[in-house]
Image: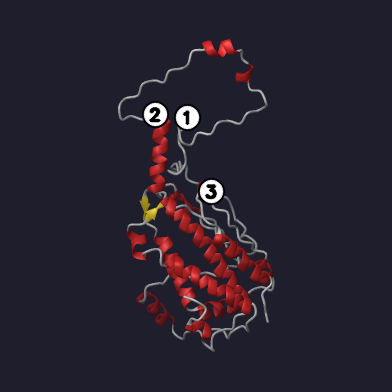
Amino acid sequence: MNADTPHLSDPSAPAMPPRVRTLWSEACDWVAWLVGMFDRDALKTTGISREHGARVSIWLMNIEGAIRRLILAAALVVAPPSPRASRTCAATRVHTVAASPRRPGFCVFRLRGVGETAPRADARTSRSTKPYGHLTFPADPLLCLGDAPARTGRTAHAATPRARNPLDRWVRPSRQDPDWRAPEERGAFSRRDAMPASHSATRPRATPQPQAQGDLPPSLADWRRRHDAWTQPVPAPDLAARLEALSAVIANPAAAIASAARRLHASCATAPTLMRQAFPDADPPRRAAHIATAGHTTDFLKRCHAGLIAPDTS
């Protein structure tokens, strides 16, 4: 995909500023590269490893954030479209929704209103029984604009112990462990250096305890368990849905821009200011801090946010 798509050249489509159009062409290339890497049906069934899933989530976090800001930059300079015509019959609306499967959507921004309530406490009681899948990344700041809803009251959570995350270490690393890191020296001279040479030479060394054949010490066994947890294939239907949503918004950017402009026109007056202040959080979670990426998608996200702060209206 590139900037010469029929939707961008369609005279009825909302016009994009020149700077946004250039970035949008690059966004189309990023989406085409990411979507072409995976079979979405295989992601839903076979899945991918947790390590590869974390790397894909980093790419998705940056590309989705960039597309959101490009859509907003274009929606802020176009005239608000006319409101959608309401359907005449509620029964027809229910029948239409039930007849067609719901396609994954792409949310550009979300404003938290005064009337919103906090999530129900009983919806979080089954969290401990749910098996751990792929890592959960923080949401885009554009999806939580405005004041947080006030909590009406505190409810007691069920006293169910939460299962340990398989990606964490459950046993303290030993000196033979690949995760072992020697403590830093506190000064120029350590206690071992201050000992006489004769004392250190005659000090008996601790002999390692013999292990049964095929048996590993607890630290190495825990390291192997965590390594297998990172490489274990886990179904990723949410990642497949996000790829489908990206493909849909790239295929028809005019609809996304028109919808964002309509919602901006109906939202509060401070919404554009809140959006420009919603700087992207490109840092992955602590458990995925070791996942290496080239950083190109992060740089692209920052350039797109700069386009949202100072869009080119020429």
Could you tell me how far apart the alpha carbons at marks 1 and 2 are, in whole angstroms? Answer: 9 Å
Q: Are marks 1 and 2 in contact (CB under 8 Å)?
A: yes
Query: Which label belongs to residue 217?
Result: 2
Residue 192, above or below 49: above
Mark 3 is on which residue type? Ala
Q: What element carries label 2?
A: loop
Q: In this image, 265 relative to 164: left or right?
A: right
Pointer 2 or 3: first along the chain? 2
Q: Residues within 10 Å of mark 2 (few under 14, many from 20)?
A: few
In this view, the residue in front, 49 or 115, is 49
**In the picture, residue 22 is in which quadrant?**
bottom right
**Residue that badge 1 annotates:** 174
Q: Residue at x 60, y 73 (%)?
A: 72
Image quarter hosting the C terminus: bottom right
Rendering coords of residue 63 (x, y %): 53, 65
Pointer 1 or 3: first along the chain? 1
Q: Can residue 71 be seen in this view?
A: no
Residue lying furthest bottom in this view? 11
**In the picture, residue 15 is in which quadrant?**
bottom right
Q: Residues within 10 Å of mark 3 (few under 14, many from 20)?
A: few
**Residue that badge 3 annotates:** 289
Q: Which residue is drawn at 49% across and 74% down?
A: 249
Rendering coords of residue 100 (x, y %): 36, 76
Could you tell me how far apart the alpha carbons at marks 2 and 3 are, in whole angstroms? Answer: 27 Å
In this view, the residue in front, 47 or 189, is 189
Q: In this image, 144 relative to 89: left or right?
A: right
Rendering coords of residue 10 (x, y %): 51, 87
Mark 2 is on which residue type? Pro
Mark 1 is on which residue type? Ser
